[in-house]
Structure formats: C-alpha cells, structure tokens
Image (spheres, grey):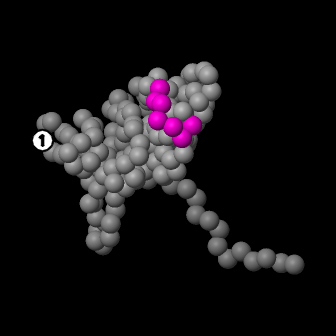
Amino acid sequence: FLYQDNPTDWFSAFEPGSQTRTDIFNMQETGYNFGQHMSRMSNPGLRGWFFMATYTQPCTDDWASNQFLMIEIANYNRKNPDGSANPPRLWRIGSSQNGPYAVCGSDKDYFAEGFAMLDYEGKNIFVGSNWNRKDNLELYKLELPTTWYETLNGNIKYPQAPTGLTIKN
C-alpha cells in the first residue's frame, strides 16, 4: 500500500502482512510545490517500484514539477555495506507537458492534472495531457523499454568497455 502521509510529509509504503512501514522520500525534497497521482505495480513479477505523475503551476521550476517518475520502494535511510547512503532510486521518465493551472495563475482545472497510469503488465503508461494548457485533452501511450525492470534492478550485464586503445594520427 502506497500513500502520502500528510502529518509527516513522507511518501511511504505499508506492508499489512508484516505491519512494516517504509518511508521512501519526503516532500521537503521536492519543494512541496506539486500534486501527484501514484500508480502501484500490479504485475507480481515487477515488485519494488511505483509510478508517480506530478503536476504544478507552469512557472514552478522545482525538479519534480510536471514529471513522470518511477520510484523504488526502499527505506530512505538505507545504507550500503560500507555505511554510505543508498536512498531509493528515482527514474525520471519524462515531462508531462500538462498545464493544470492558467499560466502562472491560480485557476486550477482538475481534469487537466497529470493523470497517468501504468498498465497491468508494467510495460506502458497511459497519459491524459492537455499539452501545456491547449484547449484539448488527449490520450498518449508511453512504451517503457522492455528491459526497464531488469536494468534498474541490476540483472542485465553489459559488455565491458574495451581497454588499452590508442589513438593514432
């Protein structure tokens, strides 16, 4: 179960079976200036990540403004074996190009928020976008790379770069 804990400003996960809460990241890191829609991973073979679509006023330039993000479900205070920080990873998929507000104004249009949802297989994202506040709302399909899960989880080994190369004039 994924949720935004309003009293503490954490985005967290809760595992009912073990009664374990995992704090993933705090809204303070985003500048507090965004709304969001979250989508869990339905495919049981692709656990450990969730999808988030954010929306803000167009004149907001925080890093999380109007973005599509895949976020690892892991404890924010996780450490590597050497004791160094190893917080949850974040994959920026792209910009939503949505304009839920009038340009730098406060008139909000609920139906123009960054609506996006993962399909059941975790291979596609379906997005409703008004493309920067145009007078339309369109449906887009974002196809994720077929190996996104394996790549992010380190299960794909890429060939080593060649060594000992020299440049001759």
Q: Quadrant of residue 163?
A: bottom right
Note whether 44 is above or below 66 in the view shown. above
Q: Residue at x 13, y 41 (%)?
A: 18
Q: Residue at x 71, y 74 (%)?
A: 165
Note whether 26 is above or below 145 in the view shown. below
On the image, the x and y values in percent for residue 49 come to 36, 42
The secondary structure type at the circle numbered 1 is loop
Residue range (magenta): 103-109
163 and 80: which one is in front?
80
On the image, the x and y values in percent for residue 4 come to 27, 40
Q: Horizontally, is 98 left or right of 81 in the view?
A: right
Note whether 75 is above or below 57 in the view shown. below
On the image, the x and y values in percent for residue 63 come to 48, 52
Q: Horizontally, is 130 left or right of 37 in the view?
A: right
Magenta run includes residue 10:
no
On the image, the x and y values in percent for residue 132 come to 60, 33
In the picture, the quarter occupied by the C terminus is: bottom right
35 and 123: which one is in front?
35
Which three-letter amino acid code belongs to the residue tagged 1?
A: Gln
Q: Horizontally, is 23 left or right of 70 in the view?
A: left
